[in-house]
Amino acid sequence: MKSDSKLLSAPYTVWMTVFIVLPMLLVGYFAFTDKSGSFTMENILSVGQYSNVFLRSIWLGAVATAVSLGLGYPLAYIISKVNVRRQNIMVMLVMLPMWMNFLLRTYAWMTLLEDNGLINSALAAVGLPRVHMINTAGAVVLGMVYNYIPYMILPLYSVLTKIDRSVIEAAQDLGANSREVFWKVVVPMSMPGVISGVTMVFVPAVSTFIISKMLGGGGNLLIGDLIDMQFLGSAYNPNLGSAVSLVLMVIILICMGIMNQFDDGEAVDGGGMLI
Amino acid sequence: MKKAGAHIYTFLIFLFLYAPILVLIVFSFNDTETGSRAVWGGFSLRWYKKLFEDRLILEALRNTLLIAVVSAAVSTALGTMAAIGINSMKRLPRRIMMNITNFPMVNPEIVTGVSLMLLFVSAVKLFGGRSLGMGSLFAAHITFCLPYVILSVLPKLRQMDPNLYEAAQDLGCTPVKAFFKVVLPEIMPGIVTGLIMAFTLSIDDFVISYFTSGTTQTLPIYIYSMTRKRISPEINALSTVLFAVVMVLLIIINIRSFKDRGQSQREETYI
């Protein structure tokens, strides 16, 4: 297209400079200053006190991402195999729960998981012992998987439907059985979808602060809760909050950098990511 | 055998996705004084009645819809323009633009929210003006919707044969006409996807709104303030209404697209 169409992105460039680049610089500024505005390393150094919070967040986020991938991939694959009309219906069914606010979806799980909730009532009704589920790390992971699994399924599905049938037929003609076709052709070709799915689940999961609050009780404090407390909570301290945010960003970027090593570089300027 | 397995698996995943929603809907009809969430007290529409009398919820709903419509429209227009611009760039500037675009998606929502809060609070401190509210919510929502629009439109632009645009011009179209007659129809599915995504994300957003809303109420923020006390089944009733509206909209869209294909409408009773 013509070179002057480049100008079309000018408003966007200005917008992103003001609302993405500038705010990030502000986070950096707050993280390295104290209340009076003079330079200090104190905020960054005191983040170390919360290493257990960071480790817990990363661990629970990673588990939730793995479970979402494990559950979501087969479904995305099944959807990509049915005829187009059913594909549309099933994709719609995957997206539909996203229309219900995630606070409500999480709240609904509270109803199910509580000690006197529906699942335990059902267990008791058939004579099984009650299980303590709410306010556990498992409940937090469940809440993460439930809320974010559509973000895993949709990119996987869109990559899987784009795979050229003739490539699969070629593999079959060359003697591959269905298992080999799946693992040697379909899975490698769906890697861009896997990577964006993993990103879209891991990032919100690791930084959530509502799910842990509602399903994890007080004992499962995550990074998000820590940040929330510094900005809108009792422990008001935007400088420390900015420092925690900065460390969280660095951790995420490192994780994404590692993830990107598994990609063949094709997705870098398409659905890919930073670095 | 294999097919049955796939069916069972699909059923189980959808059960997992829909069971909690079903519970919410069922309990919106629950007749209890306390609004208990585990004891069934009989069928009642009292929470629906209360819902339509609750001025605060309705105001929050109005704000949410207004923000979603405006930010979806603005981000779709801005994002589509940006995607066309980015697509025509050379490799290096395109990479830079894509990195900036990907950044808010890779960056944790809470950090985006906190950073925007710092921006708005600092702006108010420096230049005066009104504190956080609808204005900051519009700006924040457009910002987090934009990358999703761009990433839905760009693949369509890339799939498109660039010769089509040139052919249209060779056949006498002006560049503007060629754009509207050739390029736009080609990338339309991407634009619509982007628009729907932006709208959905905006309605559903809690985290970024939470940090940038000041005292303005949106529905998710209102719900959050209720979870800290006790959720009234009014909210269940509201989600049921919203859910029903979405279902009806989707059914209508489906029937329409089905009609367009010139097929019988009679079979299309389910979505």
Image (cartoon, coloured by chain):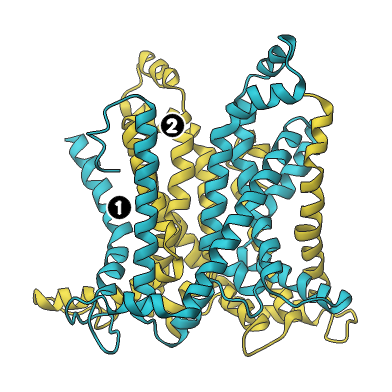
Chain colours: A yellow, B cyan
Q: Are marks 1 and 2 in contact (CB under 8 Å)?
A: no
- Chain to which the residue tagged by mark 2 belongs: A
* Residue bearing mark 1: B13
Q: Quadrant of the C terminus of chain B?
A: top left
Q: CA distance from mark 1 to mark 2?
A: 20 Å
Q: In the image, is residue A247 above or below residue A237?
A: above
Which of the numbered marks, if any, corresponds to residue A142? none
State whether residue B106 appears in this view: no
Label 1 CA crowd tier, 10 Å (few <14, some 14–19, many 20+): some
Looking at the picture, tell me which residue is in the foreground, A187 or B245: B245
Query: Secondary structure beneath disc 2?
Result: helix
Q: Quadrant of the N terminus of chain B?
A: top left
Q: Position of residue B86 (x, y in %)?
A: 74, 36
Q: Which residue is mark 2?
A: A161
- Residue A57 pos. (x, y %): 53, 70
Q: In this orientation, does residue B49 appear?
A: yes
**Residue drawn at point x = 36 percent, y = 80 percent:** B50
Label 2 crowd bin: few (<14), some (14–19), many (20+), radius 10 Å: some
